Amino acid sequence: MSAVLAASLMATPSFGGGNQSVGSVLELLKGMANDNTGSSSPASGGTLSVNGNSLGSYDYVVKVGDQTVSSFNAADWFTSTEDSRSAFIVVVGNLTINSGQVFTPAVRKLFTAIYVTGNLVINGAVSMTARGANHS
């Protein structure tokens, strides 16, 4: 991690989850990226409202430092809550998904958003095939 990025993270309060009301999904993801402690395990966040529209509940994980997925384990990135929550994945650093790895939740999610502050290298795949929520 660069000294500038490290200094920036130290000066910014950490993201604490909870109910969120933001102007855009990008705004939320950038706020999560400012988490200087990281969340090594996926966690329940609360409810989410974007530009005045309720998007239901969300889960999130923030990983600080470069991440290489060479043996994908969904539990490292997603909660096991099915249908009722979206998933936000933030990597403060680089994310590499190696060949032969499919980055996908184990259960259905409302949607998934991945935000990487560094380089994203996908030699495998990111997929939501058969993972759309069964939600009213």
Image (spheres, helix red, strand yellow):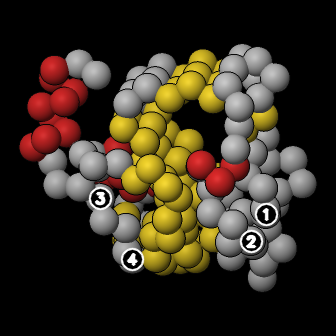
Q: Is residue 8 left or right of residue 22?
A: left
Tell me, for residue 1, which label it has, or none. Answer: none
- Horizontal side of 110 relative to 102 (left or right) equals left
What amino acid is found at the position of numbered circle 4 in the picture?
Asn
| Residue that mark 3 sits on | 15
Label 3 SS: loop
Distance (Cα) linking label 3 and label 2: 24 Å
Quadrant in which the C terminus is drawn = bottom right
Mark 2 and mark 4 lie on one chain; the one further toward the N terminus is 4
Is there CB contact under 8 Å for labels 2 and 1? yes
> Which residue was labeled with disc 2?
82
Residue 113 falls left or right of residue 99: left
For the point 49% across and 39% down, which residue is it?
A: 115
- Residue 19 - label: 4
Residue furthest to the right: 130
Q: Say few, some or many: other residues with alpha carbon within 10 Å of mark 4 (under 14 / 14 to 19 / 20 or more).
A: few
Q: Earlier in the sequence, mark 4 or mark 1?
A: 4
Query: Residue type at mark 2?
Result: Glu
In which quadrant of the rendered image does the N terminus lie? top left
Whether residue 26 appears in this view of the structure is no
Q: Residue under circle 1?
A: 108
- Residue at image location 15% in from the left, 48% down from the top: 12
Marks 2/4: CA distance? 19 Å
**Distance between the alpha carbons at the discs numbered 4 and 3:** 11 Å
Residue 84 on image: x %, y %: 68, 76
Residue flagged by tag 3: what amino acid is it? Phe
Report crowding for label 3: few under 14, some 14 to 19, many 20 or more residues within 10 A (C-alpha). some
x, y percentage for residue 31? Answer: 31, 52
Earlier sequence position, callout 2 versus callout 1: 2
Residue 107 drawn at (x, y percent): 78, 62
Where is residue 134? Give x, y as percent.
84, 73
Q: Earlier in the sequence, mark 3 or mark 2?
A: 3
